[in-house]
Image (spheres, grey):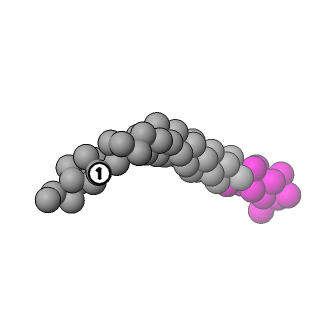
Amino acid sequence: ESLSCRLVFVMMQYCVAANYYWLLVEGIYLHTLLVVSVFSEQRLFRFYLCIGWGE
């Protein structure tokens, strides 16, 4: 195998890994937005808790 082939393979693997990590970061960001928007209202927290766990 030539050096250029190995470099292209390494770059391809790097791009795939970077895409997965970027997807992870976007998911964490959206999860944080959702948690902040839902649980910022403490008066509704028990209501959400009852819906989720049933009481």
For image coordinates 75% across by 56% down, the residue present is 10
Tag 1 secondary structure: helix
- The front one of 19 and 38 is 38
Image quarter of the N terminus: bottom right
For image coordinates 81% across by 54% down, the residue present is 7
Q: Is residue 25 magenta?
A: no
Which secondary structure class fits the magenta region best? helix
Pick out the residue farthest to the front.
Answer: 43
The answer to whether residue 34 shows anywhere in this view is: no
Q: Is residue 9 magenta?
A: yes
Residue 11: give x, y in percent of width and height: 75, 50
Q: How crowded is mark 1: few (under 14 residues within 10 Å), some or many (20 or more)?
A: few
In the depicted structure, whether residue 16 falls above or below residue 37 = below
For image coordinates 82% across by 58% down, the residue present is 2
Tell how many labels. Answer: 1
**Residue at image mark 1:** 46
Pick out the residue farthest to the left.
Answer: 55
For image coordinates 15% across by 57% down, the residue present is 54
Mark 1: amino acid: Arg
Residue 48: give x, y in percent of width and height: 28, 47
- The front one of 31 and 15 is 31
The magenta stretch spans which residues?
1-13
Residue 37: give x, y in percent of width and height: 46, 37
The answer to whether residue 28 shows anywhere in this view is: yes
- The front one of 53 and 8 is 53
Image quarter of the C terminus: bottom left
- The front one of 45 and 24 is 45
Q: In this view, does 12 lie to the left or right of 31?
A: right
Q: Is residue 9 left or right of residue 35?
A: right
Q: In this view, does 37 lie to the left or right of 22?
A: left
In the depicted structure, whether residue 48 falls above or below residue 1 = above
